[in-house]
Image (spheres, rainbow, N blue to C red):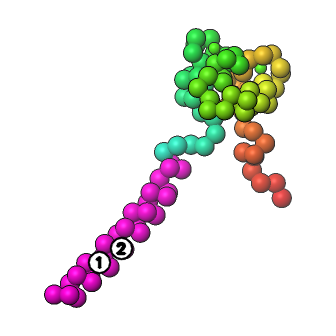
Amino acid sequence: MKITAVLFALLATASLSFAADEAAKKPEGDKPKGPTEAAFTKKDGNGDGKLTKEEFTKGAPDAAKAEKQFDRKDKDKSGDISKEEFLAAGPKKEKEAK
Ligand SMILES: [Ca+2]
Ligand SMILES: [Ca+2]
């Protein structure tokens, strides 16, 4: 009877680690990293196609950090972020240059 218990334990461990692998893989597929059009639309509270600093920093856990991000994204310094600016990949997203 004991062998059955050991086997069962082994099986449980194996399927657990398998499940952990699956869980580790999933987030990448479900949540694309970086800015998305959906995120932009969500942030654009008044729907005018631009994000003001207020809209951009609203709901951000770290307002100071969000403001810095805003300044970096506002490439033409117009005081708002267009969709193009929002979706533009930051320096980190570029493929590794060799
Ligand atoms: Ca807006
Ligand atoms: Ca701008």
Q: Main secondary structure of the magenta part?
A: helix
**Residue 89 percent across, percent down from the top left:** 72, 38
- The three-letter amino acid code for the residue at tag 2 is Thr
Q: How many marks?
A: 2
Residue 13, disc: 2
Residue depicted at 56% across the width and 43% down the height: 32
Tell me the element at label 2: helix
Q: Quadrant of residue 98?
A: bottom right
Point out the stretch of residues depicted in magenta.
1-29
Residue situated in front as seen by the camera: 93 or 2: 2
The answer to whether residue 25 is left or right of residue 49 is left
Position of 43 relative to 72 (above/below): above
Residue 31 part of the magenta-drawn span: no
**Residue 59 percent across, percent down from the top left:** 58, 26
* Contact? badges 1 and 2 (CB < 8 Å): yes
Q: Give the distance between the C-alpha atoms of the residues marked 1 and 2, in whole angstroms.
A: 6 Å
Q: Quadrant of residue 3?
A: bottom left
Write down the residue under mark 1. 9
Tell me the element at label 1: helix
Residue 82, disc: none
Residue depicted at 75% across the width and 50% down the height: 95
